[in-house]
């Protein structure tokens, strides 16, 4: 017997960590759970094999000193990672079933025996959701986008939120720089005020954008849940940051009021003012 040899034996027992196979009387080898199938998540031995079943396995290692024989079952099966379909490419949109939920994301079946990970950061755009995986459950069928395929690491990254409109892009399109937007004060820090300008989206009014900001105590000037009017000065979609200004809003309001004043009939026109001056100089 030597490494890389294909042997035949009978399954004698199944454990949590693998299956024991008797090659001949007094000689057993172990097929560890990680050597049962190509799937990233090792299956339960009882789901693959049965006691008394005859199997073929590959000899992976022979430890004469400790009298241990390591066997592999998956090595006699085609590696699905070597046979990925042409649709498994970055940017493609597929449909699959959620196979498991973890604290860092959810696994979705990409192809038979191959799973992709939907990281918690790629489930939803709403950063206020405390537990994004609560939106999913095992057995759900979802549409997802392939974000990355790493054949060397045998890892596929997938995303759900990429199929939804980015709320920051929507906000930028609807609120160009200079737009007046009303929002609710969510929190007050030493460096500025965070204002909710849309559901789940907050912008920052830096202290330098508050009238006389460096000379006032923001907690005395503003209160949580207070409605304030601001002007949009920057929307950074990539970093999901919105910069607002109360100072610029005040200026815009002054310009608007002046414009309205100049358009009223009560305000003297240039012609009437000129006539007045001419009359006075006569």
Image: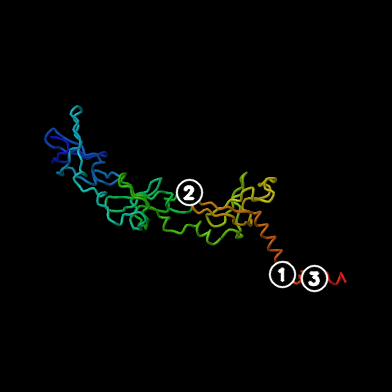
The residue most toward the right is 282
Helix, strand or loop under label 3: helix
Is the residue marked by circle 1 packed among few (<14), some (14-19), or many (20+) residues within 10 Å?
few
- Marks 3/1: CA–CA distance: 17 Å
Q: Is residue 265 left or right of residue 9?
A: right
Out of 177 and 65, give the one closest to the viewer.
177
Q: Answer yes or no: do the residues labelled 1 and 2 have beta carbons within 8 Å? A: no
Instruction: Name the colour scheme.
Output: rainbow
Q: Which residue is mark 2?
A: 130
- Marks 3/2: CA–CA distance: 67 Å
- Whichever of callouts 3 and 1 sits on the residue coming sooner in the sequence is 1
Can residue 157 be seen here? The reply is yes
Q: Nearer the viewer, mark 3 or mark 2?
A: 3
Q: Answer yes or no: do the residues labelled 3 and 1 have beta carbons within 8 Å? A: no
Q: Nearer the viewer, mark 1 or mark 2?
A: 1
Q: Residue 5 falls in which quadrant of the image? A: top left
Is the residue marked by circle 2 packed among few (<14), some (14-19), or many (20+) residues within 10 Å?
few
- Whichever of callouts 1 and 2 sits on the residue coming sooner in the sequence is 2
Can residue 9 be seen here? The reply is no
Q: Is residue 173 left or right of residue 218?
A: left
| Image quadrant containing the C terminus | bottom right
Out of 9 and 53, give the one closest to the viewer.
9
Seen at 42% across and 51% down, the residue is 122
Q: Which residue is mark 1?
A: 263
- Whichever of callouts 3 and 2 sits on the residue coming sooner in the sequence is 2
Is the residue marked by circle 3 packed among few (<14), some (14-19), or many (20+) residues within 10 Å?
few
Q: Residue 66 falls in which quadrant of the image? A: top left
Q: Which residue is mark 3?
A: 274
Q: Residue 62 in the image: x percent, y percent?
A: 18, 33
Q: Nearer the viewer, mark 3 or mark 1?
A: 3
Q: Residue 14 in the image: x percent, y percent?
A: 22, 40
- Marks 1/2: CA–CA distance: 52 Å
């Amino acid at each position: 017997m030597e490494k890389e040899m294909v042997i035949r034996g009978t399954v004698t027992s199944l454990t949590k960590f693998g299956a024991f196979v008797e090659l001949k009387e007094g000689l057993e080898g172990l097929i560890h759970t990680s050597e049962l199938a190509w799937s990233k998540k090792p299956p339960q031995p009882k789901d693959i094999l049965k006691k008394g079943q005859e199997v073929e396995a590959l000899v992976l290692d022979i430890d004469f000193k400790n009298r241990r024989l390591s066997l592999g079952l998956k090595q006699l099966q085609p590696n699905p990672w070597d046979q990925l379909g042409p649709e498994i490419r970055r940017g493609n949109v597929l449909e699959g079933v959620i196979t498991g939920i973890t604290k860092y994301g959810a696994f979705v079946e990409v192809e038979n025996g191959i799973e992709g990970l939907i990281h918690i950061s790629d489930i939803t755009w709403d950063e206020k959701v405390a537990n994004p995986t609560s939106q999913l459950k095992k057995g759900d069928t979802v549409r997802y986008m392939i974000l990355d395929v790493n054949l060397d690491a045998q890892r596929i990254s997938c995303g759900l939120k990429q199929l939804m409109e980015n709320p920051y892009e929507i906000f930028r399109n609807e609120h160009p720089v200079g737009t007046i937007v009303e929002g609710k004060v969510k929190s007050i820090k030493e460096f500025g005020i965070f204002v909710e300008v849309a559901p789940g989206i907050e912008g920052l009014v830096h202290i330098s954008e508050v009238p006389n900001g460096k000379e006032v105590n923001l907690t005395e000037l503003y209160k949580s849940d207070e409605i304030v009017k601001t002007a949009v000065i920057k929307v950074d979609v990539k970093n999901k940051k919105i910069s607002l200004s109360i100072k610029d809003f005040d200026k815009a309001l002054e310009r608007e009021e002046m414009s309205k004043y100049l358009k009223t009939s009560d305000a003297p026109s240039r012609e009437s003012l000129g006539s007045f001056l001419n009359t006075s100089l006569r």
